[in-house]
Amino acid sequence: MTITIVGHGYVGLVTACVFADFGNKVWVIGHTEEKIDRLKKGDPIIYEPGLKELLEKNLKSDRIHFTTDYQKPAAESEIIFITVGTPPKADGEADLSAVFEVSHKIAKNLRREFTVVSCKSTVPVDTNKKIEQILLKEKPDNVEIAVASCPEFLREGTGLHDTLNPDRIVIGSNSKKAIGLLLDLHEPLNGKRVITDLASAELIKYTSNSILATKISFANLISFFCEKTGADAETVLDAVGFDHRIGRIFMDPGVGYGGSCFPKDVKALLQTGKNLGINVNFLQAVEDINEQAKINIIQKIKKFSPGKKIALWGLSFKPNTDDIRFAPSIYIIENLVKNNFIIKAYDQIASKNIERIFGKQIELVQNPYEAVKNADALVIVTEWNEFKQADLMKVKKLMKHPVIFDGRNIYEPANMKKLGFKYFSTGRKTIL
Ligand code: UGA
């Protein structure tokens, strides 16, 4: 098949490389020439494990092509995926301007007898219908279109693995022909097929992300109970998670969820609910608990840090990505800087992105040990593997005071006691 992907972010580029690797001809459309030039040279722009290699391989095989021009891709492709961003507006509603803007451009450039336009961006219920209206109004008379909603469930940091091993492939459409073509394209992939209508497909995506965010907020809420009562959050959540109806996954308490998805999607569902007159207090609580999780670590640092010099490990919103959108690190840095803390931070790959926000307000260093030199306390914000087995004796020697605030519970309290650290973690007893 020949397909087009509009957008080259985490979803767009991963999807493009995977389908190209299956042997399809894939066009990727972007709107910045400079970025398209980099992509043509094999630079994925974003960091996602394995993506650069897959991009280079498919560029060499001449199966993936990058452009800013819609003409050829739209005229050639059987399926066009929209994967552009839908960031939150000030009121939390999803900003759909990019989705509609590209829909206009696609419409004008359609030339095939029949084209499927499928939205992979996370969009509120009814958006695909609006895309369809734009396409029907602006397409040439002699071509036919069908829209389909194909939500994407990949996680950043494991994007390729998730795309190649989906739990389910959801296709929402009223057109049998569109469903048939999309099923053909996804043929090499395992996973349950869910064929449904547009609105259900749109809502499946928000439901998935909101339930996952709810699990995290629930774990954080329980960790607040544990901190007040002396119970141990990890033991409580492990025991609860052994119940298969509940499961332990996505119940790691910490500094709260970040990233470009959960914060935005919970907000957008909240806003849609309000617009529909539905009581959405439950979703509001999920959000509030997430805010409280970030506030908690700040309060602990302010109360218990023996001094103002802070080392910070981990800046990305989760490990294995350079993405800092809505990362808890941003909130933590902002608040610590406001309270006159001096920060030396380290992250394997997200430092450049953080530098764009904070400039010289914080010092960014090249390795975790440099960050802790003379520090009064170490704050762990992202659970990168390299921190899990760091040389803690070396860390202790380098620090001015052996104090750790662990926002991701990566160390065993008993071990920290043995090593002689003051150790503040999440929902577990403090080691003093
Ligand atoms: C999330 C979903 O997991 C994907 O299925 C979905 O496709 C994606 O959003 C999207 O809508 O595009 P992602 O945001 O990339 O994926 O990463 P997650 O692994 O879900 O982590 C999100 C946040 O939750 C991170 O800040 C992570 O640290 C936090 N988290 C996760 C916790 O605090 N506790 C947990 O137990 C799990």
Image: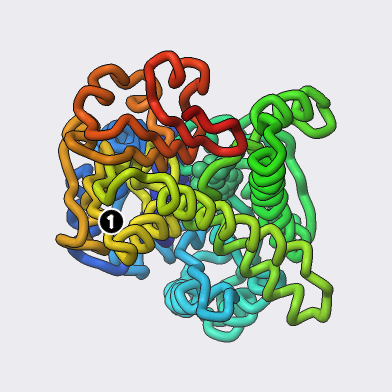
Residue 260 vertical placement versus 166 (above, below): below
Residue 348 vertical placement versus 328 (above, below): above
Q: Is residue 48 left or right of residue 59?
A: right
Quick check: is the Cβ at mark 1 less than 8 Å away from ligand 1? no
Q: Is residue 327 left or right of residue 187?
A: left
Q: Residue at x 42, y 49 (%)?
A: 301
Q: Residue at x 57, y 73 (%)?
A: 94
The percent position of residue 151, horizontal first and vertical second, equals 62, 53
Q: What residue would you read off at disc 1?
A: 341
Who is closer to the viewer here, 251 or 185? Answer: 251
Who is closer to the viewer here, 173 or 273? Answer: 273
The percent position of residue 397, horizontal first and vertical second, equals 22, 23
Q: Secondary structure at mark 1?
A: loop
The percent position of residue 268, horizontal first and vertical second, equals 63, 69
Mark 1 surroundings: few (<14), some (14-19) or many (≥20) residues within 10 A? some
Who is closer to the viewer here, 39 or 105? Answer: 39
The kind of residue tagged 1 is Phe
Which quarter of the picture shows residue 246?
top right
Q: Residue at x 46, y 65 (%)?
A: 85
The percent position of residue 356, horizontal first and vertical second, equals 22, 61
